[in-house]
Each structure stands twice: as structure tokens, then as C-alpha cells.
Amino acid sequence: MVKAITDTEFKTETAQGVSIIDFWAPWCGPCRMQSPIIDELSQEMEGQIDFFKMNVDEETKIAGEFGIMSIPTMIIKKDGQVVEKLVGFHDKERLSEILKKYI
């Protein structure tokens, strides 16, 4: 399951384990293409990776801290540290390969 989080929840929610945060906006076409892939992977990798979404129109602080200039952008964190930043659309196979490196 993908959980929507806010700027204030970000550090607590992504402090432990492996997590991926999808920075998106409802008006973004590539974001709408990425969303079902994120949903599918969240079910397939449940218990291994935490999946989060942050709407950059509503939650601007964290997006600004990470210098997110284009969306979709996904950040992968392991034990609170950013280990990878992915900009643009990624198909399911490629995103799955990337995530498996961290579990």
C-alpha cells in the first residue's frame, strides 16, 4: 500500500528500513503513468519496502530540500539516508530492479 505523507511526517516515516518516496502532482501526465506501477510494486514488495507519495503542490518543504525541479522524481532511502534519486518515468521492470538492490 502506498501512503501519502506530509512534510512533517517525512523524517519519521522514512527513518528506518528501505523506503521510496514518489514526488508527484495531479496535473502531471508522467506522474499519472508512474502511479499504477508504484501501486503494483507496493503490493509485490509489501513488508520489504515502504512506499510513500508526496504531492509537491501541497507539500513543498521536503521537495525544496531535495531540489526537486521536475516530476515524477522518486527518492529511495535506506535507514534514513538517501541512496538513490530517480527523475522521470521508470517502467515496472526497471524500477523493480533498482529497488531490489536495497532489500
Image: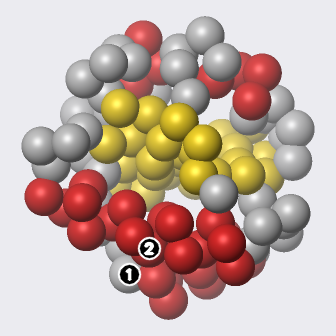
> Looking at the picture, which amino acid does disc 2 mark?
Ile
For this rendering, which residue is in front, 88 or 83? 88
Q: What residue do we see at 64% from left, 66% from top?
A: 42
Q: Position of residue 11 (x, y in %)?
A: 71, 21
State yes or no: discs 2 and 1 in contact (Cβ < 8 Å): yes
Q: What residue do we see at 74% from left, 34% from top?
A: 14
For this rendering, which residue is in front, 4 or 7? 4
Q: Quadrant of residue 47?
A: bottom right
Q: Spatial distance from mark 2 to mark 1, Cα to Cα?
A: 7 Å
Image quadrant occupied by the N terminus: bottom right
Image quadrant occupied by the C terminus: bottom right
Q: Can you say whether 10 is above or below 44 in the image?
A: above
Q: Can you say whether 46 is above or below 10 in the image?
A: below
> Looking at the picture, which amino acid does disc 1 mark?
Asp
Element assignment for label 1: loop
Q: Is residue 95 left or right of residue 86?
A: right
Q: Position of residue 88 (x, y in %)?
A: 28, 60
Residue on which the image places disc 1: 91
Q: Is residue 35 visible?
A: yes
Q: Can you say whether 70 is above or below 20 in the image?
A: above
Q: Quadrant of residue 67?
A: top left
Label disc, if present, on residue 37 of the rendered structure: 2
Q: What residue do we see at 87% from left, 47% from top?
A: 17
